[in-house]
């Protein structure tokens, strides 16, 4: 995968989903390119819930790199408005027959309320496709 070129004037802030963070930490090229671009523009955000997920799956030898990654991002905490929107998102999607995880609903609602796009490979986790940052797959990587 590689990220598509975006215009410099867009300056879109991006909430990095856990899968992209893991790909970066594993040294996968598209994720490294994306993160360096976001860090250079100071537009890389990470949900406090992704911090939880990274720590939950981290091995001892990954602590230092993971902490550097987290420290390089702007952390988005949960607020009462985000949690209300997350609950509403869960309820409305469940009515439509789609069950989402609580974490995905809260990451989504963080992005909506804060005006971010979401960088993720897990597009099926977010039914609102307009909020997903476009990533292009490069089959050779």
Image (cartoon, grey):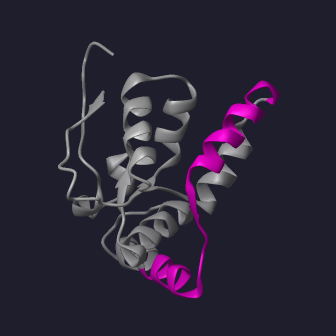
The residue depicted at 30 percent of the width and 60 percent of the height is: 12
Residue situated in front as seen by the camera: 123 or 45: 45
Give left or right: position of 70 versus 96: right
The residue depicted at 42 percent of the width and 33 percent of the height is: 31
Q: Which residues are magenta?
A: 60-88
Residue situated in front as seen by the camera: 88 or 95: 88
**Residue 77 location in percent, x, y?**
61, 71
**Residue 39 location in percent, x, y?**
46, 46
The residue depicted at 78 percent of the width and 24 percent of the height is: 61
Q: Is residue 84 rendered magenta in the image?
A: yes
Quarter containing the C terminus: top left
Secondary structure mostly taken by the magenta-highlighted segment of the chain = helix
Q: Quadrant of residue 92?
A: bottom left
Q: Quadrant of residue 109?
A: bottom left
**Residue 124 location in percent, x, y?**
33, 50
Residue lying at the far top of the rendered structure? 140
**Residue 74 location in percent, x, y?**
55, 59
The residue depicted at 55 percent of the width and 24 percent of the height is: 26
Give left or right: position of 63 versus 117: right
Residue situated in front as seen by the camera: 129 or 67: 67
**In the depicted structure, whether residue 91 falls above or below residue 25:** below
Q: Is residue 64 rendered magenta in the image?
A: yes
Quarter containing the N terminus: top left
Give left or right: position of 32 versus 68: left
Residue situated in front as seen by the camera: 94 or 3: 3
**In the depicted structure, whether residue 51 falls above or below residue 35:** below
């Amino acid at each position: 995968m590689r990220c598509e070129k975006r215009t410099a004037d867009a300056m879109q802030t991006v909430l990095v989903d856990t899968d992209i963070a893991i790909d970066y930490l594993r040294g996968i090229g598209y994720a490294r390119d994306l993160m360096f671009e976001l860090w250079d523009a100071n537009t890389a955000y990470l949900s406090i819930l992704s911090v939880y997920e990274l720590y939950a799956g981290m091995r001892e030898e990954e602590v230092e790199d993971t902490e550097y990654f987290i420290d390089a991002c702007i952390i988005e905490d949960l607020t009462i408005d985000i949690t209300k929107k997350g609950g509403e998102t869960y309820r409305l999607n469940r009515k439509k027959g789609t069950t989402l995880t609580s974490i995905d609903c809260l990451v989504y609602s963080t992005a909506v309320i804060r005006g971010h796009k979401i960088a993720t490979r897990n597009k099926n986790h977010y039914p609102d496709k307009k909020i997903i940052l476009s990533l292009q797959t490069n089959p050779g990587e």
